[in-house]
Image: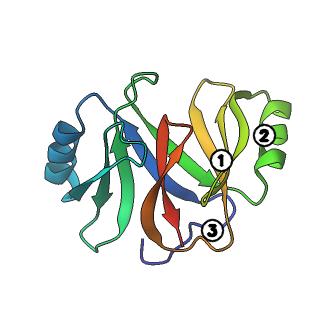
Amino acid sequence: MNKDIRNQHGALSWAELNTNNPQAAADFYSKVFGWTSEQNPMPDGSGTYTCFTNKEGEKVAGAMTCEKSPIQWSVYVTVDDVDAAVRACTEAGGEVLMEAFDCPEVGRIAYLKDPEGASFVVITYLKRCRKLTRLVSLRGTSLLFVHR
């Protein structure tokens, strides 16, 4: 990612892995992509969040353990208006998995599913969010890096 497109409508802006073993995942993706990893304590003290960094030093994804979710990657798509994206999703035959909510210091987020069953997350980052700096808890079950 030489050009930061995270704030452009429709851009894939973050990826997050839910896994039972973040260290094994870190080892695997290090071998496959050359990613390095850093584990950080979750703000609520419930465990750690692993952040993956590519060879260029850019933070590209995260991993965490969440027993309420299946083992899978979640993709975050930047949108200009989360509520409009939710409406467009349902009008196009998609489904809302988690209603839109405001995440302090991050932005507005909703979890959606397309008509074929693929889930994804839409997000509108706060205007002041620009650079990855620290972790923020999302309802105690998921984390995002805050862009400043």
Tell which residue pokes out farthest to the front in this image. 45
Please report contact status of discs 2 and 1: CB closer than 8 Å, yes or no: yes
Amino acid bearing label 1: Val
Q: Is residue 55 left or right of residue 12?
A: left
Residue 7 bears which disc, if any? 3
Q: In this view of the protein, which residue sits in the foreground, 28 or 130?
A: 130
Q: How crowded is mark 1: few (under 14 residues within 10 Å), some or many (20 or more)?
A: many
Residue 86 bears which disc, if any? 2
- Mark with earlier residue (3, 2): 3
Q: Residues within 10 Å of mark 3 (few under 14, many from 20)?
A: many
- Mark with earlier residue (3, 1): 3
Q: Mark 1 points at which residue?
A: 122
Relative to 41, residue 54 above or below:
below
- Mark with earlier residue (2, 1): 2
Q: Name which residue lies at 81% across and 31% down.
A: 90
- Give residue 42's position: percent from left, percent from top: 37, 46
Amino acid bearing label 3: Asn
